[in-house]
Structure formats: structure tokens, C-alpha cells
Image (spheres, grey):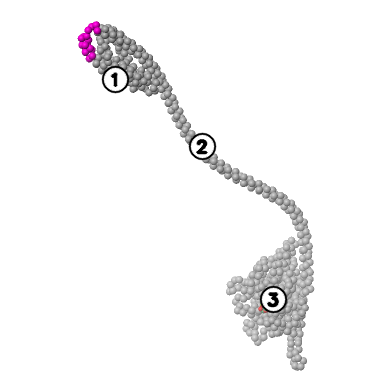
Amino acid sequence: MASGAEQGKATMNKKNSSLPVLLGKRVLLSNTKENSQPDQKKMRRDVEPVKPKAAATVTFSKRPVVASTRPTLSKPAPIRKASTVAAGPSRALGRASQQRPSDLKGKVSNTDGKSHNKVKTVHQENKELKGSVAQMQQRGAELKQELDKQRNLISEYEVELKALLGVKEELEKTISDKNNLQRDLSNLHDKYKAMETLRDSQELELQTLKMKLSVQESTLAQLQATLRDREEDIRSFQETVGNQRDAIHAGELERRQLHNTIQELKGNIRVFCRVRPQVGGGLSEHIQLPGSDNKTTLTLIKTEESHTGQAGDTQKKYNFTFDKVFGPHASQQEVFEEISLLVQSALDGYNVCCFAYGQTGSGKTYTMEGGDLEETGGVIPRAVQQVFRASKTLREQGWEFSFTVSFLEIYNETLRDLLYTGMASKRPELDMRKSTNNEVTVTNINYKKVTSEDQVFALIDLAKKNRSTGQTNLNDCSSRSHSVFKLDIEGEHAGRDIKCKSSLCLVDLAGSERMVKSQSQGERFKEMTAINGSLSHLGIVITALANKESYVPYRNSKLTYLLQGCLGGNSKTLMFVNIAPEPDNFGETLNSLRFACKVNNCVIGTANSNRK
Ligand code: ADP
Ligand code: MG
């Protein structure tokens, strides 16, 4: 198309190049024809809009081709052509003046015709161009309108875009929020799953527990029913127990009475004789024991050489009868069985006193204390054991007991506390006092409250140590002192308002041997006098009691004074006479047996229980 427009332009320029001569003429000529000038002017002005025709053609292209055509329009060519035209006429007029007038007239009319046609054509073209220019202008206005519309749209879009950007931002925020929420949701979901699992297991557990509970409930119901039955049983048992308690108590009272009757029939003072085994083993010939089990007699045989020498040796027999005689093979257990009934009497409220009498080495300490082994234990530990065991049984019947232990020795008529634990230099002096109820108490001595046999055994151990301290020859010293173990018993039956009080005295006497007077000097003599004195006073007291004399000389020795309560009509007394079987001891053995026999023949009133 552009090339078409160029062609058109080129054609027009070619035609115009031949025009100047004519145009110059026409300018001159046109003075008569006024119409032609405006046409000419019109044509020149219209020449330019030819380009817009090209531009009009360009309108279909969206680019504003008008701008590109402008340079062509602004070409100064017409001005140059005008100058050419100005120079041209002089030359043309020069040539025309040389030509002939007829040729010229023809030529001019010819040229006029031609130019008239051309003007017509140009007019036509101009008209067309005007039309297309108007079209173009209309089109331009439309386009401008369209452009404005588009611009408005764009600004609207821009506003919308802004709003959309805001929306986008919000959307992004919402998306990130959504992601966070989704994360949270998935976490919560996980948690929910875990909780579900937990709930399931707990439900299972609950189910199991419910089952267990129902089992337990049924067991409980059964147990409650059983309990009700048992309670019923217990009530009836309690009734029975109450009745039986009454029966037992009545039985117990009866037993005590019978027991006491038996003891009285046996004698309130009894003497047991015990012969220890010989040191070198074997049997001694001068002591004869009956072969029967229930031994009560002992014969001491003294073989004397015949004075005449004719009838051979003569034998002198000394027969003794005691409540019981124990040979060298009698065990500690057997010996204790015989005195356990007396220990029972102590719990029943009777005072009980047990002595071991005999020469040194005859077995007094062995009988009273015994060895360290259980089977070699003597009267004291066994009596303590029995008292605590029997008190337990009586406790079940409603009795309550309290026990007090004291342990002392009498040496040279002085009292010494064997339970003293202080410094030797600060050992207090002991004295005896008689209380208003005629009970003898020792001042400054340790009276130890005890609740078990073990506590008593600990005190016995302490007494053993106390006896040995400060004494160079233990056997010697202990054999020249009396040791007195005393257990005071207080019982109370709260339910029946009965109280009882008694003492169990277990005495290991000093050796009864008599010294040859010429050998006794100084301390030894003093000791011997004291021992003999107290032992003979013991004999005197017992004899006075036996003879029911109005005055009983208890105060003559510390021993009898101390044991006053245990030797009266209210007591049960047992004496062991211990015999050393060796022939050398014959004299002492005879003395001991005689003394014991004297005691055995005493009948000490009738004992009364210390019941209140
Ligand atoms: P005492 O106390 O009369 O001086 P002991 O009791 O110390 O005499 O006895 C002297 C010795 O004889 C001790 O070694 C003791 O163990 C022993 N003895 C005493 N009696 C018996 C007995 N029945 N069986 C075994 N040994 C005994
Ligand atoms: Mg002894």
C-alpha cells in the first residue's frame, strides 16, 4: 500500500514538474479567471492531504502512520518549485515570444483542456480525500473516545489491581494461617489419636477393674455374712469364756487351797539332802543311799578299829531321814522339780525361803546358782523362770504382777549390796529397818523393778561380778559369806479385787565347817565366829519357832533378822543340806546332817497366805 502511495506521489510530482511553465502562465492568466486561483490554491493545499489518504489507508494498521507521513508533507519541495516557477516564466516567455501565435493558441487550448481535466480529476480526488479525511477524523475521535474509555478502564483496573493486591496479601496471610492451623490440626489429630489409644486402654482397664470389683464385692458380701456368723459365735464364745473364767477362778482358788494343804502336810519347813559326786569319781563307802527311786534316807557309816583287836572293826551307823535325798547322779532338773511346788506357792501369796547349808565345797553354790549351761542351771535361775512363766498364765486369768529384785551378801555381820554399780569408795553402808507392817527393809540397797526373766538374769550376772571384785581368793571369801537373792512379788486381780504379796528368798549360806581353834587367828577367827554365830542363830530361831516360844531371837544375827519374814508362821521353808562325799569330810558331814535333822524335826505352825 505504502508503495502505491509513493507511486502516486511520484506521478503527481512528475506532472507538477511540467506544470510550472503552465502554472506561471496560469498565474498571469488567472487574473481574468478568479475561480482558477482558488482552485489552484485548493489543489496545492489538497496535494498535502494526499498523504493523509495514505494515512487513511494506514488507519487500518493500528500504528499512527500519520506521523511517518508528516515529514513528506513538510518537505520544502513546493517552495523550491515555486522558485523554479519564478525563474521559469522569464525563460518560457522568452521562448514563447519566439514561437508563432497560432501554434501557441492551439497549444494553450490544448493545454487548457488537459489541465481542466486534470483539475477535474484533482477535484474528484480532493473530494474523495476530503471524505476520507472526515472519515479519518471521525475515526480519530472515535479512537480518542475509545482511548479515554480504555484509560478509564485502566485506572479502574489499577484500583481493582490495588484492591486485588491487598486481597492477595490477605490471601497469602490467610494461606500461611491456614498452614499453621493445618499443622496445629495435625498435631491435635495426633494427640487425639494418642488420647483415643489411651482411652481405649483405660476403658479396658476399667472393664477389668469393674470385673475385679464385682468379684471383690461378692467376696466382701460373703465375708460380711461370715463375719456376722463369727460375731455371733464370738458372742456365744465370750459368754462361755466368762462362765469358764469363773469356773477357772473357782478352780484356781480350790487349787491353791489344795496346794497349800499338800505343802502343810509335807511340812512348812522341809529339808532336802544332796550328796555331790566325789571329786575323783567312784562311790564313797561311808555314805549309803537306798536303791529305791524315792530316796528319803541316808546312812553315814563310821568304821572304828576295835579297841581289843579281837572282833575286828566295828561300824557305827548314823541314820538320817529327810523329805528327800538326792544322790550324786541327781540332775539339777530333778532337784528343781521337787521345789517347783514351793515356787508356785510364792505366786499364790506365800513367803518362800530356800537355804543351802553345808561345808565349803559341798555343792551349795552349784545347787543354788549352778553352771552357765541351761541344764546345769541351779535353783535361782529355774525359780525365776518358773515365776515369770506362771505369772503369764495367771495374767490370762486377770492377775497383774510386779516384781522387785534385791541381791546382797552378809560378811562378818555386814551387809553388802551386790547390785551396786557405783564407785567402790562411795559404796553406802546398808542397814535394816522394820516398817510399820513388820516388814524388814534394807536401807540404801538397790531394789530393781523387773518385768522379764532376762532382766533378772542380767542382775544375777552383775551380782556375780560384784562378789568377785576386790577379792583375791574368790572361793574363800564367798564361802565365808551368806548371799541372799530376794524376789518380791506383788499380785493383783483387779476384776475380783484380790491382792497378794510375797517374797522368794534364795540363800547360799557360808560354809558351815568348824575350824580347829588353834588354827583360828585374827581375821579368820573373826570370820569363823561370825559364820558360826549366824548359822547357830539360824538353828536357834528355827528351834524357837518349832517350840512355839513367845520370844524368837531374830535380832541375834543379821541373817535371821533379814529373813524374819520368810521364817515365821507365814512361810514355807526349804533347806538343802549339801554333803561332800569324800571320807575326809566325815566329821563335817555328820555335823551338817545333825543340824539339818534338827531343823527337819521342827513344825513351824500353819502357814497363812498373805492375802488381803
Ligand atoms: P560350795 O558352794 O558349797 O563351796 P560348790 O558349789 O562351789 O561348793 O561346789 C564345789 C565343786 O563341786 C564345784 O566345782 C562344783 O561344780 C562341784 N559340784 C558341786 N555339786 C555338784 C553336783 N551335784 N554335780 C556336779 N558337780 C558338783
Ligand atoms: Mg559356794
**Residue hosting label 2:** 178
| The N terminus - image quarter | top left
**Residue hosting label 1:** 75
Report whether the residue tagged 3 is closer than 8 Å to ligand 1: yes
Q: Residues within 10 Å of mark 3 (few under 14, many from 20)?
A: many
Query: Dots 1 and 3: beta carbons under 8 Å?
Result: no
Of marks 2 and 1, the one in the foreground: 1
Residue 484 seen in the figure: no
Sequence-wise first label, 1 or 3: 1
- Magenta region includes residue 167: no
- Per the rendered image, the range of residues in magenta is 87-103
Report whether the residue tagged 2 is closer than 8 Å to ligand 1: no
Sequence-wise first label, 3 or 2: 2
Of marks 1 and 3, the one in the foreground: 1
Picture coordinates of residue 577, whole percent (x, y): 72, 78
SS at circle 2: helix
Please state the total of marks drawn on the protein image: 3
Q: How far separated are the C-alphas under marks 1 and 3?
A: 171 Å
Where 253 sits versus 587, above or below? above
Q: Residues within 10 Å of mark 1 (few under 14, many from 20)?
A: few
